[in-house]
Amino acid sequence: MSDIRLTEASSHMRHGSNIGQPLTRRDGILKVTGQARYAADNHVPGMLHAVLAVSSVARGRVTFLDVEAAKRHPGVVDVMTPVHKPRLAEDPDAKTHPFMFRLELLQDDTVRYANQAIAVVIAETLESATEGAALLAPRYETQPARVGLDGDKSFAPPAVGVGNPAEVRHGDVNSALTDASMRIEATYETPAQYHNAMEPHAIVAAWDGDTLSIDTPSQGLAMAQARIAGLFGIPPSNIHIRSPFLGGGFGSKGLISGPQILGIMAARLVGKPVKLTLRREQMYGPVGHRAPTRQTLRVGMDGDGRLTAIDHHARTASSSFDDFFEPAADASHTLYASPAIATSHEVVRLDTGTPLFMRAPGEAPGSIALESAIDEAAWMCGMDPLAFRLKNYADVEPITGKPFSSKALRECYAQGAERFGWARRPLKPRQLRDEAGFLVGWGVGTATFPALMFAADARAVIRADGSGLVESGAHDMGQGAWTALAQIAADGLGLDLAQVEFRAGTSDLPDAGIAGGSAHTATAGMAIHNAGAAVTAKLADLAMSDERSPLFGAGNTGVIARDGRLYRRDDESWSEDYADILTRAGLAEIEARGKGGMDPAAQSIYAMHAHGAVFAEVKVDPDLGQVRVSRMVGAFAAGRIINPRLARSQLFGGMIWGISFALHEEAVMDPRSGRLLNANLAEYHVPVNADVPSLDVLTVEEHDPYVNALGIKGVGEIGVTGSAGAIANAVWHATGFRVRRFPIRIGDLVVPASD
Amino acid sequence: MSFSISLIVNGSPCDVELDDPRVTLLDLLRERLQLTGTKKGCDRGQCGACTVIVDGRRINSCLALAVSHDGADLLTIEGVATGDRLHPVQAAFITHDGLQCGFCTPGQIMSAIGLIQEGHAADDPERVREGMSGNLCRCGAYAGITEAVLDATAAMALTDRRRSA
Amino acid sequence: MQWSAPRNDGPSQAAGNTTGNTFIMSDIQYVAPRTLDEAIGAYAAAGSAARILAGGTDLLVQMRSGAVKPGLIVDIKKIGEMTAIEETKDGGFRVGAAVSGMALHDHPRFGKVWPGVLEAINLIGSKQVQGRASAGGNLCNASPAGDSVPALVAAGAVVTVAGPQGRRELKVEEVPAGPGRTNLKPGEIVVAFTLLPRPKGASDAYLRMIPRTEMDIAVVGCGVNLTMKGGVCTDARVGLGAVAPTVLLVEAAAKALIGSKLDEKALEAAARACSAACRPIDDKRGTIVYRTKVAGVLLRRATAIAAKRAQER
């Protein structure tokens, strides 16, 4: 996008390759000066403000809205309700593909969950719209809400996650458990969690006839475009979405949400541009969450500390009207060698918004349960928890028997343990104290996340002046796409970063796929890499078939693109500048496209995962039960690291989510009303700066020729896994109390529940 | 009926006609003065994304009624750099990667400037963490933020010493 | 802010006629009087629809959530008496009710004399909130968990309130009536806190327990104010927060400390008295059992800090 002025990093030290350099963020200056424009920062001339009125009950029907009172309020322009709204071309409850979720778009007066939109007030000012929404004073016919994992009858889901089988069996778990010399059975509970990106979902929508211009944060521009096109019955090409910066997503901006569509409907209704921003408390419902889980692990061991069986069963929940089932038990598929593994899920339907992908969906809750259980098993065997993990190290993927495309987990354990000083850990709990008398504990957890690839397109151009342009509608939600993908683009073109214009963040560019599953850098990166390779190949063809080029006839040996020149592979004294090749050919530019996607052949042979080992130290006040994480070391092997500075930040962020998972965040539901009791950032705790100690991240070198040509595995989510379990295990080691309901509460460590 | 107030915003006098007493300083900046660098994360003083400096103190602009700030001197993220020259705190945030999505960043930077002015944190990481705890960062950039504040504090102290020498 | 519904107790026109800044809309008014008398006049005339704006850190949140819909906002920050910190000749302090935590923090002497009161006030919300929030607001918000209140109770602070019937003085612990309710009469405004001069060997401390390291609401808060003479405690006051509908003055705990050398027996008795005084609720942040136990733990720790400070003074 031409209106986004990115800057070259001052610390750019180039040693032949852009990839691998710890560049600072190219959007850094925009972000530290307040110039980076997020969706709600846009002002369109004539724009009105829309505010949602949301349900205060969890289940029932809206029987009355005082629309007249709202309309009488000065500044209110219109009130959109189920009986006064633009017509949609498609039923918001229709589901025509698996990535399509049902939306609440005022289709009727039904209330499916608390905080569901029941009307939209459109006014000249934000204050008027806000007051108008308050004046609607809704009345309801209320039905009892289904709350909690025992709130309804459970059933076996057809699938979990995105099409994963709900039940997987490998070997005979039951007889292995019967024959085991030692076994543990334990149940772990994880709460509902809400993404709570710092940026509330916002949209500025402007119609011009049947074309639509939108500013809204999106982790999947092309999918959002298609969804809007279907709902409004217009071609996707009529819709232009700009999402240059997301103020965090974590999955909640992966699919366009109901409130964002309501903003578009409001603009259509009043015939003027409309801005709609969710209030923080309105983010606890219509924009997804992580469902609660209750996981039972049965683990069997032989007399020698070897696992003989892992049975991992998870109970979770979806909404009453749509399906997303957190694949928590799947965490046990890949980590520990056990001759028998079974995973299964059962689910209930609750009166909540539909759960959704949230940073490490399935892996995060599954990991804290599995890592806790593995620790409990190690203790029962009288073994050091790291030694136990090494003893049960999986050299092939346990559930499939496939070899790993690469797996440097042993090195992660070794380097992380060394840095942490793990060797000095006493085996028994409650042995360490610091000088202030606090109980000190050390814990370890194994991190893992699949190396996924989706599908992406990119376009690369070399211009007659020798500069390059690369386009892919990629999404920067903080992971650093503006920087990391540009580094890949520059290498793909054989140019320095300063010579490459990289365009992203808008829907009129080639589809970069979805920014999720820690797969965006790999997927969009491969599309960009392939587009670069394709365009330099075209350029090479041009040169090699031109008698006037020094590269003429190099076809058999080939050429290398570097520093804006093509070099004969067998004799680099023969080379030619890009600009010269194009100028001689009389071309203003040359372009090519590239695709990124998984290699099904490699996937059928290899199991592909990133791995890591996280070591945590906690200090517990023995009288108050207050827990502080005092240090953490994470060692991760995640294939090739495109930008170590940004990867470190991603891994830190994941580890802090692990702290949050273990000790802080939890949505508390009122069992009677089905409303959240802590739908705000004062009471829904995420870590503050003082909760986060000095963190240490090591990236362990890993070359993986199979995941993709660039060898990228992704670092966005793996940091959450392992970390939460490491902290829970450290709390046990400090106190001797094994807490199995997360987050660990202060009271759990002072007046422990019966163990 | 409206009410006029006079402010100094980033060094420039600014007269504002308010048509509604409910307008907060935050909404005044964002929706009426088009200074959108200051962010709204919660509108309840719980996240710190809206931090600005008013009369020398950092505050949550979402908890301040504009009408009660006649005569106030405001510093927002837009007024921190001098032309193209970044403030040392801004530069340190980039160097230490004290940001990811960037949404909380303006508030973090204003808070850091306030903290350094208060003069209690100096080179103690624990006090920096405590002093920066009113600014949530969901991406988890805290490690870089703490490093950036420590680094900027040291850099600014050095500049001050040179000036006074 | 009911625009179309009739109002029972909306502000009278008189409210709009005060000097100072006045803002009138059809049904929400804002006044920023320059004198206390004007403020009382406007506030009393407006009846129960009026709200006092000091730092605004509670009021705006309540307005945002719809819990409060004021017809009149009386901004008291332009009144000199409300924002002044005065140190009396004999070493006492009079702190205006609208003085922000940061302003108090920046006072050169206050924190040296009343470190416990200061640390309590400086735990209200984040540093940004402290740039605005005042002890007066914290007291009038009447949360059982308000951080400044137990410390002010322990300090024996006296509250000056002013209303249509004139001025009167209350002990801090007499102000809260229950969660969100005070014993102030209609039209009364908290004007200032008075802290008496303190002898050599006297100091105070406030500790609270929160799950998050910062930015959190107390699960239990405990303020201890001690006077020590020759290693013996000659006077003590103990305030406990978040363990009952209002902040408590725990006289039995003070009694256990007075006359002792703060030995284990006295501390144990005082801790027990604190636990015994608790009438807490179970909520997601802390259970009854937890709060009761922790009240005693905090008493011991706050006493140790206060005693150490007293020795150094």
Image: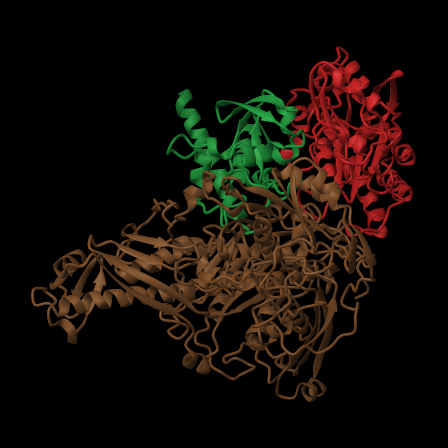
Chain colours: A brown, B green, C red
Q: Name the spot of residue A382 as percent of width and height, x first.
A: 66, 73
Relative side of C264 to A395, left or right: right
- Seen at 59% across and 68% down, the residue is A363
Tell me if residue B78 comes above or below residue B15 in the rendering: below
Relative side of C271 to A706, left or right: right
Q: Name the spot of residue C244 as percent of width and height, x first.
A: 87, 41
Tell me if residue A580 comes above or below residue A531 in the rendering: above
Nearest the eye: A423 or A185: A185
Instruction: Say if residue A698 shows up in the picture.
Output: yes
Relative side of A83 to A575, left or right: right
Relative side of C244 to A402, left or right: right
Q: Residue furthest top?
A: C89
Nearest the eye: C62 or A187: C62
- Seen at 55% across and 55% down, the residue is A249
Q: Name the spot of residue C60 as percent of width and height, x first.
A: 70, 35
Q: Name the spot of residue C64 as percent of width and height, x first.
A: 71, 39
Q: Quadrant of the C terminus of chain A?
A: bottom right
Nearest the eye: A175 or A477: A477
- Seen at 65% across and 79% down, the residue is A158
Tell me if residue A747 comes above or below residue B145 in the rendering: below
Instruction: Say if residue A135 shows up in the picture.
Output: no
Tell me if residue C155 comes above or below residue A35 in the rendering: above
